Amino acid sequence: MELKNHNRTILELSRWVKYLLWSNVSLLFITLLISIYLIFQNKIVVVQIPGGGTEVETTYERNTIDKGSQKAIILAAVSAISQINTANYAYQKLFIQSFLSPEVFTAITSQIDAHVKKMIDQRELGSFYFEFKEYAFDPILNKHFVRGDVHTVNAVKNTSEPWIYELTLRVENYRPMITSLDTYSGLEFHNSNWIDKEGRGNL
């Protein structure tokens, strides 16, 4: 009788060990699948930024965002950079830091500080504002172009000058970042068509 009970106990223990083994194997398999999914997971839904389109939400991927959101970020940064004065420059620098790479931010803030210092030294109490005219994206160069008039306003006059902003935007780990920014006066974008035309003209 004792031997029979002993054999039954061993059988039950064997079944319990097999159950635990298969449970652990199943749990390990599920954990592995979840880990693989998280590693290759590429999309995240965030609250729509101003100007990001007509949808309620905008989808960011790990290394890109939709063109509407790119345009909104570009225009917001250009507007903030263009509308600098002695009263708002500290806030504007804080704002554009969110969108600029460290290298571009360092260069732009140096220019802003020099510009504000000049205004203070000359006791210039005027202000600046940006009048947007045109936006374009060149897929060949992978560059964004913004054209508009930068207005200088003071007690005497309101002058304007056409400026073009040429920018490159990259997304890294869901963060949009402007990695290059060039400015020049004029009305024509220095895009791939312009480069091709200039190249033919120099032949």
Image (cartoon, rainbow, N blue to C red):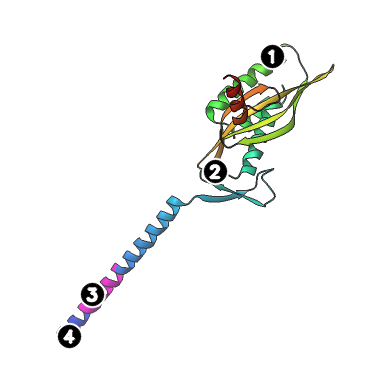
Residues at marks 2 and 1, CA–CA distance in whole angstroms: 39 Å
- Badge 4, how many Cα within 10 Å: few under 14, some, many 20+? few
Q: Is residue 161 visible?
A: yes
Give 79 or 114, whichever is nearer the viewer. 79
Q: Which mark is residue 64?
A: 2
Amino acid type at mark 4: Lys
- Badge 1, how many Cα within 10 Å: few under 14, some, many 20+? few
Amino acid type at mark 2: Thr
Residue at 40% across / 59% down in the picture? 33
Residue at 42% across / 57% down in the picture? 34
Q: Which mark is residue 4?
A: 4
Q: Nearer the viewer, mark 2 or mark 1?
A: 2
Quarter of the figure with the C terminus: top right
Q: Which residue is mark 1?
A: 118
Badge 1 vs badge 4, beta-carbon distance below 8 Å: no
Compare marks 2 and 4 and give the one earlier in the sequence.
4
Q: Quadrant of residue 75?
A: top right
**Element class at badge 3:** helix
Amino acid type at mark 3: Ser
Q: Is 157 on the left or on the right of 52, as rendered?
A: right
Give 192 or 6, whichever is nearer the viewer. 192
Q: Nearer the viewer, mark 2 or mark 4?
A: 2
Badge 3 vs badge 1, beta-carbon distance below 8 Å: no
Q: Quadrant of residue 149?
A: top right
Residues at marks 3 and 4, CA–CA distance in whole angstroms: 15 Å
Residues at marks 2 and 4, CA–CA distance in whole angstroms: 69 Å
What range is drawn magenta here? 10-21
Compare marks 2 and 3 and give the one earlier in the sequence.
3
Q: Is residue 4 above or below residue 162?
A: below
Q: Which residue is mark 3?
A: 14
- Badge 2, how many Cα within 10 Å: few under 14, some, many 20+? some
Q: Nearer the viewer, mark 3 or mark 1?
A: 1
